[in-house]
Each structure stands twice: as C-alpha cells, then as structure tokens.
Image: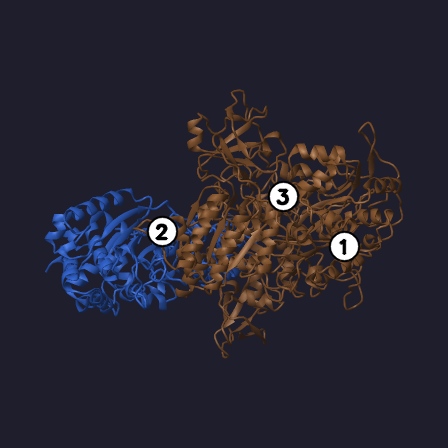
Chain colours: A brown, B blue
Amino acid sequence: MATISIDGIDYEVKEGENLLHAVLSQGLDLPYFCWHPSMGSVGACRQCAVIEYAGPEDERGRLQMACMTNVSDGMRISVDAEFASNFRSSVIEWLMENHPHDCPVCEEGGECHLQDMTVMTGHSVRRFRGKKRTWQNQDLGPFIGHEMNRCITCYRCVRFYDEYAGGKDLAAFGSRGRMYFGRFEDGTLESEFSGNLVEVCPTGVFTDKPFASSYTRKWDLQTAPSICPGCSVGCNTFPAERYGQLKRITNRYHGELNQYFICDRGRFGSHFVNNENRLRHAGAQTETGVFSYGETAKVIEQAADAMGETPVGIGSPRASFEANFALRELVGSENFCAGVSDVDWEVLRTSLDLMREGGFRIPTLQEVENSDVILILGEDVSNTAPRIALSVRQAVRLLSFDLAEGAEIPIWQDAGVRGHAQHVRNPLFVATPASTRLDEIATDTLSGDAQDFVDAANFIAELLEEETDGVDGDSRTFEQTVAESLRDAKSPLVIVGCSLKSSSLVKAGARIARILQRRGSDSKLAMVPLEPNSFGVALLGGELTLSRALDRIANGNGAVILENDLYRRADRESVDRALSQGNCLVLDSLETPTIEKAKFAFPAATYAEQTGSFVNFEMRAQRFYQVFEPKDEIQPSWKWLTALASATGREQAAWTSLDELLAACADAAFSGFRNVAPNSDFRLEAGTRIPRQTHRYSGRTAMLAHVNIHEPKATPDDETPFSYSMEGQNPGDQDGATIPYSWSPGWNSNQSVFKFQQEVGGELMGGDPGVRLVDAPVSFAGNNHTIQSAMQAEVESGFKVVPIHMVFGSDELSSLSWPIRQRMPAPFLLMSSEDAQRLNLEEGMGATLNGSEESLEVRIDSRLRSGLLGLPVGFVTDSMNLDVVAELRRDPDFVKKPGIDPNLIARG
Amino acid sequence: MSLLDTKPMIGRVDEVGGRVGLADYQAGQGYSGARRALTEMTPDEVIDLVKESDLKGRGGAGFPTGLKWSFAQGEPPTPGPKYLVCNADEMEPGTFKDRYLLEYNPHVLIEGMIIGAYAIQARHAYVFLRGEYHEPFRCLQQAIQEAQEGGFLGKSIFGTDFDLELRIHSSGGRYICGEETALLNALEGKRAQPRSKPPYPPASGAWGRPTIVNNVETFCNVPAILRNGAEWYKNLGATDDAGTKLFGVSGRVNKPGLWELPMGTTIREIVDVHAGGMQDGYSLRGLLPGGASTDFLVEEHFDLAMDYQTIQSAGSRMGTGTMILMDDSICPVDMCRNLEHFFAQESCGFCTPCREGIPWVEALLTDIENGRGQEGDLEILDQHAAFIGGPTNTFCLHAPGAMEPLQSALKYFRDDFEQHIREGSCPYQRR
C-alpha cells in the first residue's frame, strides 16, 4: 500500500496502479473517457488531469494525466487545483466543438458519460464559433447503431473491439480532426462481442439498435438483477422493462465472472420474452387437436386427473433450479428425469462425479484470465460460452505483463505493454473438430473427433506422469508440445465441455488437471455445459434417463414436462410416440413442437418474469429476480407445479410462497442455497426495500391513462427484497446480488459501477453475487448409477457427424429472439477440403444427406478432418439428428439462401 | 587545408563540385572512420568517443548522441535483436538540410550509420525517409547499392564478423512521423501515433526491441569524429557547443540557402554574411530559429550565437537550425494562421487538446486575420497557449511545438493582433 495526499487528505491506496484508478477507488470523482478498468490507460483524452507536486515545498506543481501516472508512496496531488480543473473543463470545451446538441433525441441521453463529465467539469457556454463537423454513418448490422457525429475520439471502441476482443473489422480511420471509427465499408460487425461497444462508448456513437427501435430512457426502465440464460457462464445482467416489454439487456458487474463485458447472444438474445408466440393461457387439447383455453382452475383439475398416480417428470436445464426441484418433489425422485439426452446426462453426471472427487479447482472467469497455460479439449467455447473465450484471450497476455514489468513498463500502460510484447503469448492449445475463433491466438491446434481428443488427452496425461517428453528426434507432436508447456505451468487450465457428448473426454481432461495438481501446480478444470442450469438439474439427480422416461410415457404413463422441447433432446420417432400415447402436461413460455402435441399446456414465465436460480459452469448458484410481472395467465413454472401438487393432494410439494420453496431446496441437501441471495424478508438498514424503478421514473400516471386515469397501485412483492416502485434506496453497499441498476449521484451512466465496488475492477461492496456450491461443503444428491455409454458410431463408408455449435442459432431461446434471428445462418454442412474435392463440391454449393429432400449449403473448413462432417446444432430439421451420413449428394438446383453470416463459423 | 577539416559533412560536396559518389567519397577519406571503428575499436570505445565529442542530436532536441547510444546496451545487456533507425522524415517547415545531405553526400550518412550500428551492435538498420523525397530516395538507394558492392554493407564488413543490413522505408507522409515513436509505429506498419514514454526507444523501440533513432545530420557528423577524434570535433564549434551545424535561411534575403558553419555562429552573421542580408526595401522583424515549432526571436536576439544553450536561454529552441525569417511586410497574424493550419492538419488525432484545440486556434486566427476577430479572442488564444503548450498536457510534443510560435507572437507582436480586432481588418492587406 502507498499513502498519497489528495487535496490535503491522506489516503491508503494500492501500489502499482495508476493514479486515476487510485482516486476512483477512494470513491472520489475525477472525469475520464479513454481509460477503462479492464483495458488500462492510453492517455488519449487528457480528461483526468490533476496537479502533481514535486515535494512539500512545491506550490505550483505540474499538470499530469492521472491515468498515466504511477501511484507512489508519499505523492501529493490536487484534483481541485484551479489550473487542473480549468484544464478539464477546457477538454470538454474542445470535445464540444463538434459534438452535436442532439441529447434529446440521442439514445445515450440520460445515461451518457459525456453528459456526466460535461456537468462535472462545469463547461456550459459555447465559445467556439465554427461549424460542427459531420459524418456519414454506417450500417453496422442488426445489433449496433452508428452515429459518428457524436464521436469524441476516445479510441475506446477500437481498443475494446480489436485489442481486447480480437475483432478484425472495426478500425480507426483518418487522422487529425477527421478521425473516423467504423468498418472499411458498411456491413455487420462480425465480432460476437460487438454489443459491448454500446457500453464502452462514452457517448451515443455505438448504440443498441434493437433497443433504439422501441426506445425508453434509462430512467424510465424498470430493472432487477438477473442472470443471462444464454449459456452456462451465468453472466450477470440487467434486463430492463417498460410497458410490459423487455427492452434491452445490459451488463451487470460481477467481480469474479463477467466483470464489464457480455457476449452478443446474451445482450441481444432475450427478445424471445416479447415473442408473439408466447403461450398466454392454460389449455387442454380437444379431440380435434385444437387447444381450448378454458377456465384455469378447470384445466388444472383436468390435468391433475390426467397425470395419474405416478407421473413422469421431465425437468429442464433452461428452467430455474426451483422449478426443477418443485417438479422433482411433485413426481418423486424415482420418476424425475433431468430432461437432457441420455448421452448429455452421462456427461453431466460424470462432470459432477469428478467435482465430487476433486483434485483440481473449478475456475472463475478471473481465474481463467490468470491461467498461464490453457488446453481446450473438444469445446469451441467461442461459440458455446463466448464470455469464457473472451477471458481466454486475456489469459494469453499474461506473459506480456511479465515482459512489461521486466522493462519497467507499468502493466496498466496498455499501448506500452502491447507494443513491447508484440506477439508473445502464453501457450494456448485448441483441440476441436473444426476451426474456432481462438485458433488465431493458439500455439497449436488439433483436429479430429471426440475419440481423437480422448486419445490425445490420455497421451498427454501419460507424458506428464512418466516425466518423459517422449520425443523422438526434433519434431514434436501436439501432445508433446502440450505436455511440455503444462509441465512448466504455474496455474494451468484445462477446458472441456459437453458439446462433443463424450464423458470420456471430460474424464481425460480431469485426469490431466489432477496430474498437474499432484505435480504441485495450481491446476484448474473448467467443465462447460451448454445451458444456464445444466449443473442445476444435474445436482437434482433423478433416476430416469430420458429414453426410459419416454418409454414409460409411450406406454401410457402421465407426464409433466417442464420448459423443454423434447425434439431437441431425442429422436423424432420416440418423442412422437411418447407425446401421442401419454397424457403430457407441458409448461413452457413459448410454443414449441412439444407443446403442439401436449394434452395440457401451461404458460410459463420467462426468466425475466420470475425469481429463481441457475447453477453455472463453476457450480455457482445465482439468483435472478423478477424484473416485471408477466401478463395474462403466465406465471412461474413452480407456481403451476405447486398448483398441480395441491390439486393432486401432494402436500409435500404444495408450497405457497417462494420463500417456502427456497427453504425446502436448502433442506434437501443444498444448504448453499440459503445464501445464494437475499429472500423476500431482506430490507436495507433503513428498513426499506430496493426499488426496481429509478428515482426519476416518470409517467406513472400517464402509462395506463388510456385504461384508467388513476395511478395504478404498485404491485406488492412478496417474493423479493425489491419493490415495483421508485420508493426505497439503491445505496450500493447492500448485498451484491440485489443491485437493480447502476446509478450514482453525478454518474448517470454505467460508469457509475465503480461506486458499487470495493476498488475499481474489484469485488462489489456487498460481495460478488452467488454461492459456489463446490467451494462450500455440500453433499451432492448422489445416486450413482451407470448409464450405458452411447455407442460410438462406427463408420465404414460415408461420414461421421460432429456437432458444430454456433453463438447465434444453437441456443434454443436466443434463437427465438428477433435480432439474433437476423444473424443466424441458413442450414449448412461443414466438410474438409479433401472431401469436398473428392466429391467435386465447392463452398456455397448445396448438398443433400441420406436422400433427404432438404438441401444444405456446403462450407469448407480447413481444420475439419477428412471423413468428418460438421452439422450445426440447433436446427430442428430432418438432417440434424444424424450421427452418420452414408450418402452425400450434390443438389444441382440449390440456391444459396440469404441471411448467411460467414462469421458464424470461423475460417482457418 | 582540406575543406573536410572545417566542413566534415558537406565539405566534400564543395570539393567535388556536386553529388559525391562512392569513388569520390573514398578519395576524401570516406569510410576510413567506419573502418577504424570496426577494426580497431570495441563498441564501448566508439560510444565513449562519441560521448567525449559532445555531439548532440541534430533533429532538434539536442540530446547527447553518445549517451543515447549507451542506453541501448541495457542493464543487464538485453539479448536479441536491436535496431538502428535514421530519422530522415524531414517535414519541419523551412527545413531542407537532411535532403541536401541525402542528395549530395549519402555515403557520409551510410558511414555514420555503420558506426552507430556497430556501437550499439545492431544488425538491422532503417532509414525512415520522408515520403515526398523521391530524389533523395533515388540517391540513397544508389549509394546503398554502391556501399553493398564495395563491401561496406552486408556480411563481414571490413573482414570483421560485423554484418549490417540497411533498408530504406519510404514514409506514407505525415509530419508526426518525425516524432521518433510515431516513426517506429509507422515503421511497424501501425498508425503513426506517438507512443507513451517510458518506455523510451532505447529500452523498447521497434518491435519492442532496443532501438536507437538519430537524425540524418547527427549520423553525418560521426565519421569525422572517428577519423579526427573528439578533441578536434569539439574545437570546431564557435562557442561551448561542439562541431559544425547545417544552418539554413528562408525568407526575403538575397541568398537563401544552406551552409555548414561552426556551431554557435551568430544569427546576424548567418543572415547578413552567408545569406547576403535582407533584400532592398525589407527589414527583418523576427525569425523562427529552427523550424515552425520554435518560438519567435526578435531584434534583441539577433546577435545571439546559434547553439542549443544560447537559443534556449532566449526562450526559444535552436531546433533544426534552419530559420524562417519574418520581414516587415509579413503579417504576424497571418503567419501564425499559416503555421497553425499546418499543425492542425498534421495532428495525428490521438489526444484531445491537439486534435480539437489547434483547429480552434487556426479558426480564431483566420477570423482575426479576416477582420472577424472579437473581443476576448486573444484571451482564448492565451488560454490555448497555456493549456496546449505545457509539455505534459498533451500526449506528445506536437501540440506544445505548435504553441511556440503562437505564444511568442502574442508576446512580441500583440499590438498587431489587437489592431486586427480593433480595426476589423488586416493592416498588411490594406497596405
């Protein structure tokens, strides 16, 4: 620690940081633009000027940029000194020469960092007499709006997009007063992190385009802390609502997880909440196959009768932990199925078993970023868990910080660190079937299928165990190179996942992590499932596999199916058979192929309309709170389930409140659940609730004036510590899981988040949200059972299929979000250039599989091994459930479909 | 006595009567300095000799060359490649000294660079050449080829184990490329924006490696130091400052041009003797001593010696030593406007005060010059001179450099500015 004097007051600050970081970490105000806590300092905007005094005698001092000045013990600075303060005001005056006065029509207005800094510096009168410069804007695709006139040239956009996130198609053009930030020509921003530009840009150049199409000011948005349902990372988010519509998603800071950034699937993938195909009423199928939406109580009564004595319960990795628990208690553990395919279930259970046995640490994202050697086995995280890939990109920079320290370059001096290190990177090894967007920063890659990766991993493990490098001659194989790097690593990380559906691969990854741990390194293993609550349902156990559950239903058993489209989990034939033979009650938020064939349908709330928990890839249970009340008969699944429990006399599962249900969850051996987040009885010190609406929420009397001129009564909330009003406080130091929005006096933009942190970029003042169940001593509900391993498809001729995951399209719910739909590719197949050549196929041609009528676009991947065929995950079409393709034939009549985004599959 | 003894840089040009080729250069002791360095001296001895000679960088900042070279060794010495770079991006307005050297005596530069590369043990050297310098490019390229054929570049120079590869990098064409770290970014193929310092190039320069960047004229001084020794070199100067300097004059003099003269020759001697004095009907009102980014000097300074220390004490900088004269027919407001137009145009666009502040200064000067000046404009200009002029206020020294002529003009010629605003027109245009 160092002691520094700021305007005559001594503060204890962290050494090795820059002065701006130190000043803000004390909760003091100092304007800035170009510095970013995750991206360091470059000294471009000159906004954070302070006076630094040379010693106790120095009265004049010298102007310094705080962001470019190292903290040193005993230093004396002034923020308030007149010269510094006038200089800062002058910087705003310069920026305002050309900044348009379009705040009233600007999407950023009301949460604009430039507005805040302008007010903070005091500049208000225009002295510049010249004209403002103007620009042509670009069409940057469905996600991002572009309004270059507002640009203040802070360089944050290109620094984030290119340097931090590895994007290629956004750049700084021009020079002097004619700097332009955009693409080389109009076109969709390719990076799956483009949405962060909206939050990184300090003003309204890059804006959320879907949000702009149905716009609301920040102060009029109702928000609550939530968890992204897009993948298993569990990024913390703020979904925002107005007029019953989900308007947008923004990043919610979590010190150990997503910090300042989320991916585009998360940001733009929640518009399914407003989808017109939402199920709104409970109903029963009539004999003609048409749903009749009768009186709800009656539907429940009929459904309760139809369930039978021992209904099967099929849970869901995209439903809340609480709903899955309620279902398990309703039907009994022996009748409960987690709702994933048999092979997925095996991978999930294997992952859980491995965790229970231990021998490695499950990393947080911050720990991923501090891993000095990373081995990725089979999982293309850039598509299945993009936020992890973003952290991997930061991890490979660790060496550059070492080099910088050696050259006495402060690690926050971003341009200096990057310039000095050039292309030096930490070892990263990527073993995946096809190319990934991480390949470009990888030391080496390995192609193949799951079995090849299992073999490779086991060989690496043997090399590590034997302490030999097994090298004959000069050439090193992938495995030898990996083993050599891992052996020297201090904190190595192995990343495995579920997308290749191989439990052997997960085990092989764990084997390496354990050997490394035994060798004394701080080794970590990330097992990345595909869905937001995959590990949640895995924890709940259940003794039925999906195939056995479907068999039972096909034999006429009743079933309750929770938020699950079974056609995505099992082959069409067995799902058809089950749905037609059994009495199936289906709860879901959207109309799915499964709902269409259900006997009874119940409209379930989406994550934004209810309170519940997800368990993420690091076994962190996290609470998402209801942002707004659902319309019509829509209610959280657990409420339907408890209603069914009451109706069928299953009193053990008939909880009447969320608190009761949460207590029951905790009693059922998930004691960590007690501390996931505050329950309904939580109040701030002042005894108040926390408001979902901002202190400037407007129009309360006008919003429903066309229905009733009286202001509606605020909805009472008996499930959460929040209120549906602007009454209450959001002080910032309350439990970190209960921050409904980021806002602080003088700081209206998302930059206000530092006021909620213990130090800039650190833990939230009230603690980072969630409980890592692996860290707390928990007994996992362990009913060990073995599942017959999925047969490895033996291919004599033709192709073996490998699943290809896509950030836009493979996830069910986000692919029903309209902005995401615009980025989804037409169905395609991926093949090696060798095979394409052999079959006389070229990129962009069409082909049919196994005589199907459906034509797929041919894409060629440089990494895919000959004999393998990549098929995209998430398309429910005839071709998509294949394991083996015996016949591949060119379709001469194929016409390439529009909407194909070549970036979805990275090219090698 | 040979001209080489008094004009080590361009004396040979005068002797030959034009462009100096390899044969002519060798006939005038060419490459003997490099031979001595490589065959008789250790790199440390070369650095010590250059330190003793008191040679200062001729690019404008006047940093001691030997000391700079010693930084590239690193402590402890860094393994791996090092680079030597010649800054030939001569874009300072009024400056044409490097061009003369490149066109007329390119071998003296090559020899100086061989010595420099040997001293810092660099195997790769670059000449970063101003984009518009087509003729110098041709001359230098030919000289490099001659030197390669003559065994002065390439493998095993002078039969030693020292190799040197010398390449020309023709600039894309921005004034800011003359700033050494922007130059290095441009050399690496990046945007020509300056880098934050530290790290300084001798610690982390081109491609993150130790790199020494020197001006053309600096290198051209080195061969003679190796030949004749440090003491001889120091004695060349007219004042305490060592060596000779290329001084130039542009403006309404009888013989505008360029001369190699002892360091410390007075301004009056340069203007009256070498440049032949002012043309009839014009009198000298002020001058920028070393390019556009130096403060005006006026009558009271004309007897000062042109050396780094003396000119700095007078509140300006010697800069490149190639002066621009302002005679009494030139409007100081208009001259400043012209200069600020240049600086605004050449800003790299990285930091706010430079990118947005200089164009405002230009706009105000344009208004004042065209009779649209308003009360309070001078205060805004003063404020800019203070806010942009501080060395730590902006990212690099481009903007402070741009404020030097302005702030000195506001000091010495303030009446002119006030008169413009008061009368609503430019008195020089009315004449």
Given residues A93 and A505, the one toward you in this image is A505
Given residues A218 and A875, the one toward you in this image is A875
Q: Secondary structure at mark 2?
A: loop
Q: In which quadrant will I find the N terminus of chain B?
A: bottom left
Task: Tell me if A677 is positioned left or right of A67 in this view.
Answer: right
Q: Is residue A865 above or below residue A845?
A: below
What number is the disc on residue B345? none
Tell me whether marks 3 and 2 sit on the same chain: no
> Which numbered disc flags the more N-terminal residue, 3 or 1?
3
The percent position of residue A379, horizontal first and vertical second, equals 53, 47
Tell me whether marks 3 and 1 sit on the same chain: yes
Between marks 1 and 2 in the image, the one whose residue lies nearer the viewer: 1
Of all chains, the one bearing label 3 is: A
What number is the disc on residue A342? 3
Given residues B130 and A226, the one toward you in this image is A226
- Three-letter residue code for mark 3: Asp
Give the alpha-carbon distance from disc 3 to disc 2, as whole Å. Answer: 76 Å
- Three-letter residue code for mark 2: Pro
What number is the disc on residue A693? 1
Q: Name the residue carrying label 2.
A: B93
Q: Secondary structure at mark 1?
A: loop
User: Tags 3 and 2 in contact by the CB under 8 Å rule?
Assistant: no
- Asked whether residue B30 is in view, the answer is no
